[in-house]
Image: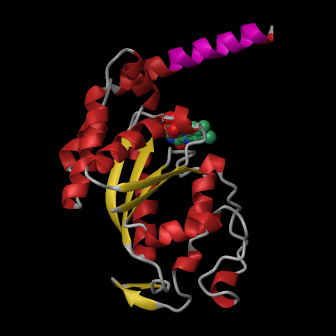
Amino acid sequence: MYVVALNGSARREKGVTTTLTSALLSGMQEEGAEVELLYLRQMEIEPCLGRFDCWYKSPGRCSVEDDMQRLYPRLRTADCWVIGAPVYMDGIPGPMKNVFDRLLPFVEPTVEVRDGRVRHPMGVGVKGGSLILASVCGHWEMETFDPLLAYMQAFCDSAHRAFAGALLRPHAAEFVQLLKNGGGDDILSAAHEAGRQFMRSGVLPADKLAAVSRPLLTREEYIDRANDRMAQLMSGERRMAA
Ligand SMILES: Cc1cc2nc3c(=O)[nH]c(=O)nc-3n(C[C@H](O)[C@H](O)[C@H](O)COP(=O)(O)O)c2cc1C
């Protein structure tokens, strides 16, 4: 299986997105996946210009000459896309959204009814496949991921991909603290195992996904700790500024 992984964390290797995505990908690789990982922070990908050149002027080809041109052949042929994206302001980070917007040439300009909805047919030379989301967020609740999950499902429905599910790690700062204190192995193992089982069965195992997302503290504890951490950071900043 050829897997293209896009990492949209602004903090690249230092990000929790990378910690989570790496565990998933290593599991997939262990079961034979050929993985290509690209960090969007290392690429120049402009927003879509909205000119529809990819439909009318040069069908199937985007006219913006930037690093997206390197991504197109990979995304066209990959069996699975792994999208590593933290929650930013209740959505995906801008550079990742630029990539999705620039995928308009992957569908035809004509329309048809599919699953009861008007949609575009799949573009010529585009291989359908699956998509896995690996996301992290700051806040405590799993509901924080709802907008991303809804977007990924809608994108997959429109772009002829099967949304295979998501690895979701809430209250990421607590997870980092846990890792620093030598814990969290169960979470990384669950992500790794999810990758292995996906390769074997094409399904992300529900028990492993639940293990990845397990609460690390109560909501009340989270609120206290988050505010304490913020107070410490702010007083440090003020001392530096004084
Ligand atoms: C610009 C910005 C917006 C964010 N918005 C949210 C948000 O809406 N909800 C949330 O729970 N966390 C939010 N966060 C927290 C990040 O999801 C969290 O810090 C995560 O660990 C970032 O991913 P990384 O560790 O890969 O950099 C935001 C962080 C940044 C920098």
Left or right, 185 with reference to 22:
left
Quarter holding ligand 1: top right
Depth order, front residue of 227/105: 105
Q: Residue at x 68, y 69 (%)?
A: 48
Q: Residue at x 23, y 61 (%)?
A: 202
Task: Determine whether 242 is above or below 68 in the image.
Answer: above
Task: Determine whether 17 is above or below 120 in the image.
Answer: above
Depth order, front residue of 18/240: 18
What's the coloring here?
Answer: secondary structure
Left or right, 47 with reference to 120:
right
Please tell me in which quadrant of the rendered image residue 185 appears.
Answer: top left
Q: Residue at x 62, y 87 (%)?
A: 59
Write the start and end of the magenta stretch as one range: 227-240
- The quadrant of the picture occupied by the N terminus is bottom left
- Percent position (x, y) of residue 220? 37, 22
Depth order, front residue of 236/183: 183
- Percent position (x, y) of residue 130? 35, 65
Observer able to see residue 204: no
Task: Determine whether 183 is above or below 69 in the image.
Answer: above
Q: Is residue 238 magenta?
A: yes
Depth order, front residue of 86/67: 67
Q: Main secondary structure of the magenta part?
A: helix
- Percent position (x, y) of residue 189? 26, 35
Q: Is residue 66 magenta?
A: no
Q: Residue at x 57, y 64 (%)?
A: 71
